[in-house]
C-alpha cells in the first residue's frame, strides 16, 4: 500500500506548464515611412478589450502612387500595465513566426526586409512599393510555427505555410 501511495503521489501534477502560451495582441500598427521622405502613413487595428466585447477600431491610410515605403509592424498587448511589447517576442522567436501580406491591389508589392536566425523571412520590417492610383484591401496575417521550407512560403505565399494564425487584420488601402 505504501508503494502504491508513493507511485500515486509521484504521478500527481501541479498546475500544467504551457511552454509557449499564445500572446494576446490588442494593438497592431503598420507604420509606413516614404523612403524619399515625407509624412508616414499608419495603418492600425486596436481591440483594447480583446476578443469579444466591443468591436475593434481599424484605421486605414492613403499611400502615394509611385512611392516606396519602409514598413514596420508593432504589436502590443494593452490588457497589461504597462503594455506588453509582443513585437520583441516575435522578433526573438523569428524562426517560429512569419507575416503574410495579401493585397487586392495589383499595383502594390510588399517585400520582406528582415530575416530570422535561419535566413528565412519574418516580416516585422518590409518594403512596400506602390505604382498606380487605386483602392482595395490589405490583409496581414501573423502565423505561428509556419513551415518556412514549404513551397512558396519564403516569398510570402501562405497556401502551404500551415501553422496557427496569431492575428489577421484587413485594412482598406487607398493609393492616390
Image (spheres, grey):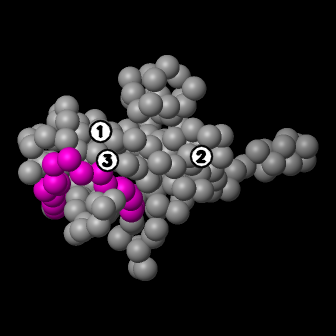
Which stretch is magenta? 55-75
Can you tell which mark lies on residue 25?
A: none
Chief secondary structure of the magenta span?
A: strand
Say above or below: 20 vs 75: above
- Name the secondary structure under disc 2: loop
- Residue at the spot x=30%, y=61% of the render? 36
Q: Outermost residue, right direction? A: 3
Q: Is residue 53 visible?
A: no
Say above or below: 105 vs 48: above
- Mark 2 highlights which residue? 116
- Mark 3 highlights which residue? 128
In front here: 37 or 166? 37
- Residue at the spot x=44%, y=31% of the render? 155
- Residue at the spot x=65%, y=46% of the render? 117
Q: Label 3 crowding class (10 Å Cα cut-off): few <14, some 14-19, many 20+?
A: many
User: Which mark sits nearer the N-terminus, 3 or 1?
Assistant: 1
Q: Label 2 crowding class (10 Å Cα cut-off): few <14, some 14-19, many 20+?
A: some
Give coordinates of residue 25: x percent, y percent.
Answer: 37, 58
User: Which mark sits nearer the N-terminus, 1 or 2?
Assistant: 1
CB under 8 Å between callouts 1 and 2? Answer: no
- Name the secondary structure under disc 1: strand
Real-space CA distance between mark 3 and mark 2, rounded to the nearest whole angstrom: 20 Å
User: Which mark sits nearer the N-terminus, 3 or 2?
Assistant: 2
- Mark 1 highlights which residue? 109
Q: Is residue 110 visible?
A: yes
Real-space CA distance between mark 3 and mark 1, rounded to the nearest whole angstrom: 6 Å
Give coordinates of residue 125: x percent, y percent.
Answer: 44, 53
Residue 47 magenta: no
CB under 8 Å between callouts 3 and 1? Answer: yes
| Residue 27 occupies quadrant | bottom left
Amino acid at each position: 500500500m505504501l508503494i502504491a501511495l508513493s507511485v500515486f503521489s509521484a504521478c500527481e501534477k501541479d498546475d500544467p506548464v504551457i511552454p509557449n502560451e499564445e500572446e494576446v495582441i490588442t494593438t497592431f500598427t503598420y507604420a509606413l515611412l516614404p523612403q524619399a521622405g515625407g509624412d508616414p502613413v499608419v495603418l492600425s487595428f486596436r481591440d483594447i478589450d480583446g476578443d469579444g466585447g466591443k468591436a475593434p477600431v481599424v484605421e486605414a491610410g492613403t499611400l502615394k502612387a509611385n512611392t516606396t515605403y519602409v514598413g514596420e509592424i508593432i504589436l502590443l498587448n494593452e490588457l497589461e500595465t504597462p503594455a506588453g511589447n509582443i513585437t520583441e517576442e516575435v522578433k526573438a522567436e523569428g524562426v517560429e513566426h512569419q507575416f503574410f501580406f495579401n493585397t487586392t491591389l495589383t499595383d502594390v508589392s510588399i517585400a520582406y526586409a528582415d530575416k530570422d536566425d535561419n535566413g528565412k523571412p519574418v516580416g516585422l520590417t518590409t518594403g512596400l512599393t506602390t505604382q498606380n492610383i487605386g483602392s482595395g484591401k490589405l490583409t496581414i496575417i501573423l502565423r505561428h510555427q509556419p513551415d518556412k521550407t514549404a513551397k512558396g512560403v519564403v516569398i510570402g505565399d501562405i497556401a502551404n505555410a500551415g501553422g496557427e494564425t496569431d492575428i489577421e487584420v484587413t485594412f482598406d488601402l487607398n493609393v492616390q
